[in-house]
Image: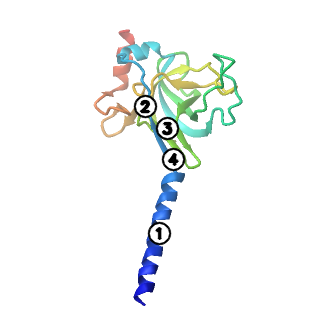
Amino acid sequence: MKKFVILGSCIILLIAISLILIYVFTYERAYVSKSYGNYSQEEYMEFADLVVAVKVIKNVETKYTNPDFTIKSTINDNEIARNELVTYSLVKVKDVIKGDVKIDEEILIREFGGKYGNTKIVVDNSEVVKKGEEYIMFLFKDTSDIEGSSKEYYELSNPYRSKFKYSKDINQYVNVNDDSRKFSIQDFKTMYEEI
C-alpha cells in the first residue's frame, strides 16, 4: 500500500511539473527595448508629424508584418523585411497640439507589440492601447510600407517618450514609462509654442 502512495505522489508531481513546463514554453512573453537616442521632450515634439490627445475607439487588428518571410525590404531588395508583431488601433482625436488633423477625426495608429495567440510582446514596458483609454501621442506618418500594407496609419515617434496616458485622479497625462513625467494638455501646448 505504501508503494502505491509513493508511486501515486510521484506521478502527480510529474504531471504538475509537466503542466508548468508546457505553460512556460508555450506562452511566450517578450519585453523589447530599443535605443532611441537621448532627445528632450521638446525635440521629440519637433520630430513628430502629429501631437494629439486621443481616445481609443478599438483595437482593430494584431498581426505579424511578414509571417511567411516573403516580403522584400523596401530599403534593400536583397533582404527580407522584418517580421514584427504589431497592433493597429482606431483612435478619435480629442485635441490637436501639432499637425494637420481635426478634432473628432478618426485615425489609425500602429504600435509594436500586442497579443497574438500565445505570444505577448510589450515594447519598453508599454502595453498597447486599449478601448476607452485616453492619451497624448507624438506620432509620425509611416510610409515605410514594411508589410506591403495599403493602410494609412501613424506610429509613435518614440515608444518610450511619446505616449502619455490620461490619469483622472490627477487630471494630467502621465508618461507610460516614467510616472514622474506628468503634463497637462496646456503644458504640451505651451511646449509646442516655445519650439
Sequence order check: which comes first, mark 3 or mark 2?
A: 2
Q: Is residue 122 above or below residue 38?
A: below
Query: Which mark identifies residue 14?
Result: 1
Q: Is residue 139 visible?
A: yes
Nearer-N-terminus badge (4/2)? 4
Dot 1 or dot 3: first in sequence order is 1
Q: Residues within 10 Å of mark 4 (few under 14, many from 20)?
A: few
Give the amino acid type for the residue marked by disc 2 in the picture: Ser
Q: Which numbered marker is on residue 128?
A: 3
Q: Quadrant of residue 148?
A: top right
**In the rendering, at what x and y percent does residue 122 appear?**
47, 38
Query: 81 and 187: which one is in front?
Result: 81
> Which residue lies under the disc numbered 2?
33
Q: How far is the residue under mark 2 from the one under mark 1?
A: 36 Å
Identify the residue at image location x=42%, y=24%: 35
The amino acid at mark 3 is: Val
The quadrant of the image that shows the C terminus is top left
Per the model, the C-alpha gap separating discs 1 and 3 is: 37 Å
- Badge nearest the viewer, 1 or 3: 1
Which residue is at a point 68% across and 19% down the rendered structure image?
78
In the rendered image, is residue 88 in sight? no
